Image (spheres, rainbow, N blue to C red):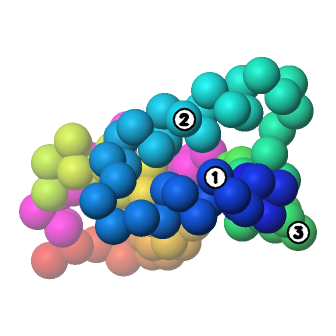
Amino acid sequence: MSIKFPHLANVFNHLEINTGQAIHSWHDLTKRSGTIPGWLWNGIKGKKAKEAAKPVDYTDELELLYCQINEITYKEFNRLVELYPTELQNELDELSESLSNNYKRI
């Protein structure tokens, strides 16, 4: 907005101006214009939308075994599902493969 209204920006750059009132003034100015200001969306140009992560595929038995091996609670396991789905899926795949190969935990 400072490009379109340099005289207002110059007034707001004064050191003793109340920043809350300055923001309120910019809001009043932009709500009457009816368009979205150009400076508002500059940071997201060219960025792609984040792809939705595939859900983690596991059984209750595998979940229980993973929690026992790593000594974590179900709450922590669910947090891993939310934050690190691909890494967790890789670990669960390795664990299920080892179970299918008849490897037993000592």
Rendered residue at 61%/59% (across/down):
9
As measured in the structure, the alpha-carbon distance from the residue carrying label 3 to the one carrying label 2 is 30 Å
Question: Does 31 lie within the magenta span?
Answer: no
Rendered residue at 36%/41% (across/down):
20
Q: Which residues are magenta?
A: 55-71
Compared with 46, 53 (above or below) is: above
As measured in the structure, the alpha-carbon distance from the residue carrying label 2 to the one carrying label 1 is 9 Å
Q: Is residue 93 left or right of residue 63?
A: right
Residue labelled with disc 3 = 46
The mark that comes first in sequence, 3 or 1, is 1
User: Which SS type dominates the magenta stretch?
Assistant: helix
Q: Amino acid at mark 1?
A: Leu
Q: Position of residue 39 (x, y in %)?
A: 76, 58
Residue labelled with disc 1 = 8
Q: Is residue 23 left or right of residue 72?
A: right
Q: Quadrant of residue 65?
A: bottom left
Density class for disc 1 (Cα within 10 Å; few <14, some 14-19, many ≥20) is some
Rendered residue at 29%/59% (across/down):
16
Residue 62 appears anywhere in the view: no
Tell me the element at label 3. Answer: loop
Question: Does 68 lie within the magenta span?
Answer: yes
CB within 8 Å, label 2 to label 1: yes
Q: Amino acid at mark 2?
A: Ser
Nearer the camera: disc 3 or disc 2? 2
The mark that comes first in sequence, 2 or 1, is 1
Tell me the element at label 1. Answer: helix
Residue labelled with disc 2 = 25
Q: Position of residue 59 (x, y in %)?
A: 46, 42
Q: How many marks?
A: 3
Tell me the element at label 2. Answer: helix
Q: Amino acid at mark 3?
A: Gly
